[in-house]
Image (cartoon, helix red, strand yellow):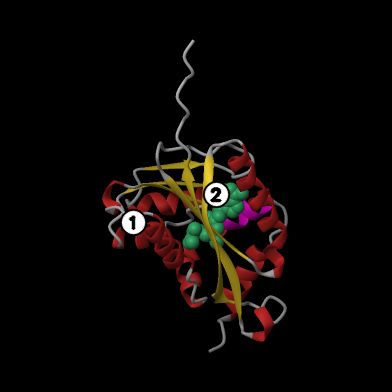
Amino acid sequence: MRLAAGVRERVAAVHGGGRLPQRLRLYDGWAARYDQDVAALEYRAPELAAASLAFAFPAPPAGARLLDVACGTGLVARELHRRGFRCLHGVDGSAGMLERARSTGLYRRLRPCVLGREPLPAPAGGFLCLTTRSNPSNLRYKVELEAALERLERQGAWQKVLAQDVERWERATSEEESTQGTGYISGVVYVYRKCPVPPLEEG
Ligand SMILES: C[S@@+](CC[C@H](N)C(=O)[O-])C[C@H]1O[C@@H](n2cnc3c(N)ncnc32)[C@H](O)[C@@H]1O
C-alpha cells in the first residue's frame, strides 16, 4: 500500500532536515503527529530497542535503570514497560518531543539534552539505548552520533554492549532512500552500560 502523501512529506522533511538545530525544530513541529506517522511507516525501532535491552539485561527488569536517549514521544518506554522495565529516564533535544514523552507518564525523569553537545545524565549502574536510521540522508548524522558514543567510551563513562544492524527498520519514503529496492530502510540499535566509578585511590 502506498504511503499517504502527507505522511511521506512530513517524514521526508525531517529526514532531509539539514544541520542539528534545524532538525530538532522539525522534530518539535512533528511531535503531535509522530506516533501516527511512524505507525504508517511500520516503524520497528522501539520494539527492537526494547528487545535488545531485554537481551542485554537478563536479571529481573523491574530494578534496571535505563536511559532512553533521543526518547522522542516515548514509544521505546511503552515497549519497555510491556517487558516489565519500570525505572526509565529519558533525554531528547526536542522540547516538543519531550512534552509528548512526559504525557505518557512512563518516565521517572525526562531532561532536555542534545547528544554530542551536552553530557548525558548518568544513572549509576544503568544502561542506555539509542537507535538511528542507516538510510542515505541520515548517514552524516549517524557518523556524528557514533563519534559522540565513541567519545563517551574513551572517557570511560559508558561501555558498548551491542550495536545491532537491522533491516526493514521502516518503510522508505523514496526509491533513493530504499535499501536495494526493498521499499524499506535499515537502522541500528545501540546499547551501552554505565561504567562503574573507579574507587578513589588511598594515600
Ligand atoms: C526518529 S525519533 C526516535 C524517537 C524514539 N527513540 C522512537 O524510537 O520513537 C528521533 C529523536 O531523536 C531526537 N534527536 C535527534 N538528534 C538529537 C540529538 N543530537 N540530541 C538529542 N536528541 C536528538 C529527536 O528530537 C527525536 O525525538
Gap between marks 1 and 2, in whole Å? Answer: 32 Å
Q: Residue at position x 57%, y 57% from top?
A: 27
Numbered mark located on residue 133 in the image: none
Of 137 and 7, nearer the camera is: 137
Asked whether, in this view, residue 114 is left or right of residue 34, the answer is right
Magenta span of residues: 22-28
Q: Residue at position x 33%, y 47% from top?
A: 64
Is label 1 in a helix, a strand or a loop?
loop
Question: Which residue was labeled with disc 2?
Answer: 94
Of 199 and 83, nearer the camera is: 199
Q: Residue at position x 45%, y 35% from top?
A: 196
Say what amino acid the circle numbered 2 marks: Ser
Q: In which quarter of the image is residue 123?
A: top left
Numbered label tally: 2
Is label 2 in a helix, a strand or a loop?
loop
Mark 2 neighbour density, 10 Å: few (under 14) some (14–19) many (20 or more): many
Locate residue 103, reporting x and y percent. Answer: 36, 52
Locate residue 149, reporting x and y percent. Answer: 60, 47
Q: Residue at position x 59%, y 41% from top?
A: 152
Question: Which residue was labeled with disc 1?
Answer: 58
Asked whether, in this view, residue 43 is left or right of residue 5, the answer is left
Q: Answer above or below: position of 190 versus 39.
A: above
* Most frequent secondary structure within the magenta stretch: helix
Say what amino acid the circle numbered 1 marks: Pro
The image quadrant where one finds ligand 1 is bottom right
Disc on the earlier residue, 1 or 2: 1
Mark 1 neighbour density, 10 Å: few (under 14) some (14–19) many (20 or more): few
